[in-house]
Amino acid sequence: MVSGAHFAAFAALTFLMVVVPGPSVLFTISRALTVGRRDALLTVVGNSVGVYAQVVAVAFGLGTLVTTSAAVFTAIKVAGALYLVYLGIQAVRHRRKLTDAMAAQVRATPGRVLSVLRVGFVVGFANPKSIVFLAALLPQFVDPAAGSVPAQMLVLGLCLPAIALATDSAWALVAGTARAWFARSPKRLELVGGTGGLVMIGLGTGLAFTGRGD
């Protein structure tokens, strides 16, 4: 139903979006440094579930429009390209926020499992970065001729929570063990955000000139 090429392309774009520090990454690092790795990892799980809830909402909200209207698709494509450029600029501008997050004081006070998962879910579901990313870009990787558009979106959308689960968990683990290493050179963290931002600006520019041929 979903071609391997479309899935791989969306997964690569999703990885770049997730790895560039945003609300979820900063929140995960803060949790790791203030309440410990356990709660940070549970938060990541809840966050991933919340993000997939966004996928479901986008799939059933935009699927029909994308299938029937080339004009809607074009508008979404342009919005997606502009949003990627915007994310890239923001990543470059705010690349020092990771350094600020790493400066938090450790205060390990683990919470109840369900409570921590709920907090993560709310953060994931309310994350503006991922909801706009999904609404603007997910429809561009579906093929109306290949079957149900919402079903394709649901499959493609699995990339986001899966990649977020892996990368955010890595940030949670790294936050504690590599804190001293990063603290010795804040430029290392700034490089992460700055480089990722430039990549996203380039992707957004290229995306504006690609897409469905109808």
Image (cartoon, rainbow, N blue to C red):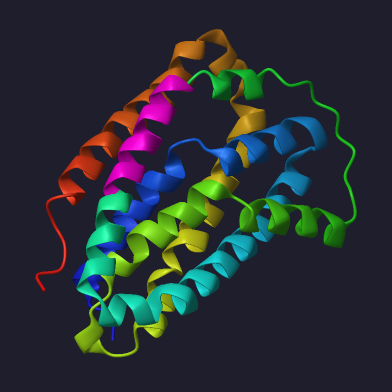
Q: Quadrant of the N terminus?
A: bottom left
Q: Is residue 184 left or right of residue 208?
A: right
The residue furthest left is 213
The answer to whether residue 132 is above or below residue 56 is: above
Res 152 seen here: no
Q: Is residue 120 left or right of residue 177?
A: right
Q: Position of residue 212 (x, y in %)?
A: 15, 68
> What is the number of callouts on the image?
0
Q: Position of residue 155 (x, y in %)?
A: 41, 77
The residue furthest top is 184
Tell me the quarter of the picture where residue 151 sits.
Answer: bottom left
Pick the front one: 25 or 167? 25
Q: Is residue 117 magenta?
A: no
Res 185 seen here: yes
Q: Main secondary structure of the magenta part?
A: helix
Q: Quadrant of the C terminus?
A: bottom left
Q: Position of residue 87 (x, y in %)?
A: 40, 37
Q: Position of residue 56 (x, y in %)?
A: 53, 74
Residue at the image point whose x is 59% and y is 25% from the top: 178
Q: Is residue 85 magenta?
A: yes
The residue furthest bottom is 147
Pick the front one: 96 or 204? 204
Pick the front one: 132 or 113? 132
Q: Is residue 214 left or right of residue 141?
A: left
The answer to whether residue 198 is above or below residue 190 is: below
Residue at the image point whose x is 31% and y is 60% from the top: 76
- What range is drawn magenta here? 81-94
Residue at the image point whose x is 73% and y is 42% from the top: 37
Residue at the image point whose x is 28% and y is 74% from the top: 142
Tell me the quarter of the picture where residue 124 sits.
Answer: bottom right
